[in-house]
Image: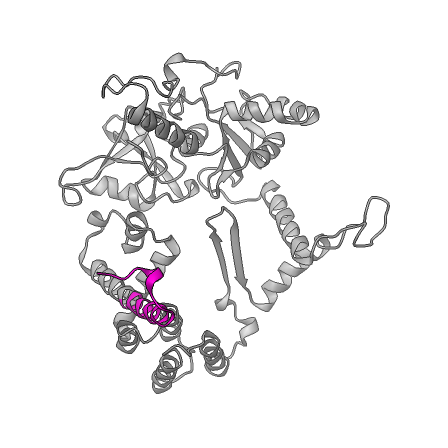
Amino acid sequence: MTTKIWQLSESELLADAATVSHEIQLLEARRIALVAEIDTRVSREKLGFPGPAGWLTSTTLLSPSKATKIVALARGMKNFPDIADAVNTGSISIDHAALILTFAETPPKDLPEEGRVMARTAMIAAATGPEARTGRIRAAITKLEDEFGGKTPPPENTDRNELFASKTLNGRLVAKMDLDAVTGEKLLTALSPLTEPQPAADGTESPKTGDDRSPAKRRADAFGHILDQYLASSSRPIEGGERPHLNLHINLRDLTDLRDSADTADADDIADDEPSRAATESDNNTEIRDPVDINTGHPIHSDSADEPDIGTADPDSGTASGGEGDRSATDRGTYRDLFGDGTSVGWLPWMGPLSRNTSRQLACDCVLTAIVMDEHGNPLNLARTARTVSAKQRKALTARDHGCAFPGCGKPAAWTEGHHIWHWADGGPTDMNNLVLLCGFHHRLMHHSDWEVFIGTDNHPWFVPPATVDPYRQPRQSHARAGPHIA
């Protein structure tokens, strides 16, 4: 019988924690080995993704970056048995293995083969055991790259340029850049005139009376200003059939609430932009996500769309008010209040949910594009006979699907294509109930495999896997609709 943690002595606590940590390392090594075998043997059709990384993300709790790292290790360690042995025995951590593997796969140009083996062996030794320090390994790599990396000095080597942008769990974006000297000079030159402290209204420049922003905050504000200027220019490249711009999806009900809660001046500003007005090219577009009259922009009220009151009898289950049935209804109501149709008050295609205050701020300074939605969040009145998806249809598809609709994918809408469920060549119309957003890979998968997609009674896409993936072929909800469900 396993001893309760609170019953362990101090020595036992320390010993158990160390043992479990080692076991986790061994399990991570086994997962990498399993992924390597999956990568070799399992077909794309069965995975439903271009490779194991997408499958891992969609079927486990792993983040996309972690899944990608595991696949990179699985593929890379096949060519470096010494690194694989160190990982499989739990001698080095996964992070250190990834660092050494990156060096092994892209060694300095002029480092001879015997030098590469010696360097790799030394790095594995430096990464072994509790005394291992990442700094020592990175210092060794930097020294070797400086000595054997070729004629271009590291500060001038554009091949080393990288920009990492990761969305955090709390909805922020963390960016890290590693730029050559010339590109860095361009960035700092562009930021310089925008990062100067701004004096107070009376002209004083004391930190207490003037601009008290930190240098980092001033640089961030300046970078946002540069992005505003770029998105406002007419020389932007085309993506997804139009120039990149900021899209905000918001329910008409919530937009109305925001208007009512705004200051009088702000409310007047919002009211100037009628929801029925066609969107011209702008930096901000707001998608209306509730049923509205396409001529007046006023809400369409429908008693049939209302949810049943909590605590009423369920005709299918025979459960009356009170007791477990009442609690179940409360749970469903709580779920509906929290998650709704998968969006918050505001929703950004790249970054996700947005607060009420920021939604109001964006809604005050944009052209509104009316996308008429039914009670299920499905766009209406956008039928077209042309083969190509129109700009307004694409906005409506983005409002409905959010991105690639294939379960577990969710690639950004800007990277997707409109797929005809009933193929255009076979007479399928370019109507909303015959379209779904898919990334390039899943678009090809739908055309060249036994995966199927249909629009359900909720007017959202549902996907049917082939029998090789699920013998029962149970339909799966689209990526934007998938999530926890209370029965």
- Is residue 177 in view from this perspective? yes
Q: Quadrant of residue 398?
A: top left
- Report whether 196 appears left or right of 53: right
- Report whether 236 appears left or right of 437: right
Count of numbered tags: 0
In the image, residue 271 sits, relative to residue 188, either above or below, namely: above
Residue 206 is inside the magenta segment: no
**Type of colouring:** one colour
In the image, residue 235 sits, relative to residue 72, either above or below, namely: above
Q: Quadrant of residue 443?
A: top left
> Is the stretch drawn in magenta largely helix, strand or loop?
helix
Q: Residue at 33% of width from left, 33% of height from top?
A: 436
Residue 466 percent location from the top left of the image: 17, 41
Q: Which residues are magenta?
A: 1-26
Residue 150 percent location from the top left of the image: 48, 79
- Report whether 79 appears left or right of 146: left
- Is residue 397 in view from this perspective? no
Residue 376 percent location from the top left of the image: 37, 24
Which is nearer the eye, 15 or 404? 15
Residue 22 is inside the magenta segment: yes
In the image, residue 11 sits, relative to residue 49, either above or below, namely: below
Q: Residue at 57% of width from left, 72% of height from top?
A: 155
Quadrant where the C terminus is found in the figure: top left
Residue 63 percent location from the top left of the image: 37, 53
Quadrant where the N terminus is found in the figure: bottom left
Which is nearer the eye, 253 or 485? 485
